[in-house]
Amino acid sequence: MRYLEFQKIFSPYLIFRSQDIKKIAPSFDKKALIRWQQKGYIQKIRNTFYHFNDVERDECFLYLGGNRIYTPSYISLETALSYYNLIPEATFTITSVTTLKTNLFQTSLATFSYRHIKPQLFFGFQLMTYNNQTIKIATLEKTLLDYLYFNHPLGTQEAISTLRLNKAILKTSIQYSRFDTYLNLFQSPGLNRRAQTLLQYIHA
């Protein structure tokens, strides 16, 4: 298969795997991937995942990469806090939660960080469409609870204040019924205390 033909078939995938190629073109020669990397046409992210070098690597493309290279996972924690404009800092690591083991991948595309969460807590994400692909990202409420779940020291308003959360956005955007529903599903007394402290901080 020639490169232009390959690009026409696989560019809609944005990020593709060698397994994807085999499903569509069983006789495809894997050595072509090496040649096309050497020519700068494509780039390996990790293991069998690749992307075309001429694709726009915007924020959502990185989120898609986070979803694809370690699955199941969804964008959350610092990256989602930044996405919802809840923290002033830009984040340079794409953070996610996963039912797989905690992991970190430093790739040519970005650094991707994953925190393990129990399968029963793998919920609370929404599906965002990006160039006909689907990205899983935590809702605002689940983002907050995930962050509190993994950060035990945030037990006081003083500690929470160090995050410099945007109270104005939280007051107008948080859905309290959803927040409470998600919180109850965690069944964690410690998280309950930290969540109540967060709500008190928001309305202080």
Image: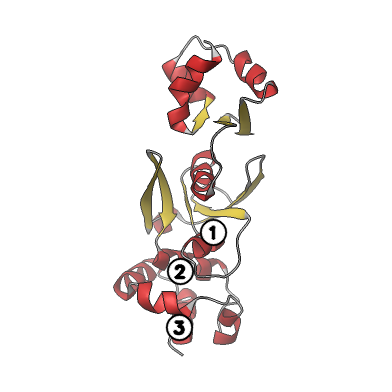
What's the amino acid at mark 3?
Answer: Ile
Q: Using the image, determine if residue 41 lies above or below residue 113.
A: above
Find residue 3 and report its horizontal and vertical position in percent: 55, 16
> Callout 2, which amino acid?
Leu
Front position among marks 2 and 3: 3
Q: Position of residue 5 (x, y in %)?
A: 48, 15
Residue name at image x 36 percent, y 50 percent: 127
Q: Which residue was labeled with disc 2?
A: 145
What x and y, as percent, mark residue 146?
A: 48, 65
Decide if residue 123 is on the left or right side of residue 64. left
Q: Secondary structure at mark 1?
A: helix
Answer with mark 2 or mark 1, whichever residue precedes in sequence.
1
**Mark 1 or 3 closer to N-term?**
1
Describe residue 157's horizontal placement relative to residue 34 as left or right. left
Q: Secondary structure at mark 3?
A: helix
| The disc label shown at residue 79, or none | 1
Look at mark 3 in the image and give the residue it sits on: 202
Whether residue 147 is situated above or below residue 132 in the rendered picture: below
The kind of residue tagged 1 is Thr
Q: Is residue 126 above or below residue 198?
A: above
Q: Nearer the viewer, residue 144 or 109?
A: 109
Instruction: Please tell me which residue lies in front, 21 or 130.
Output: 130
Mark 1 Cα shell of 10 Å, populated few (<14), some (14-19), many (≥20): many
Which residue is located at x 57 percent, y 77 percent? 164
Q: Which mark is residue 181?
A: none
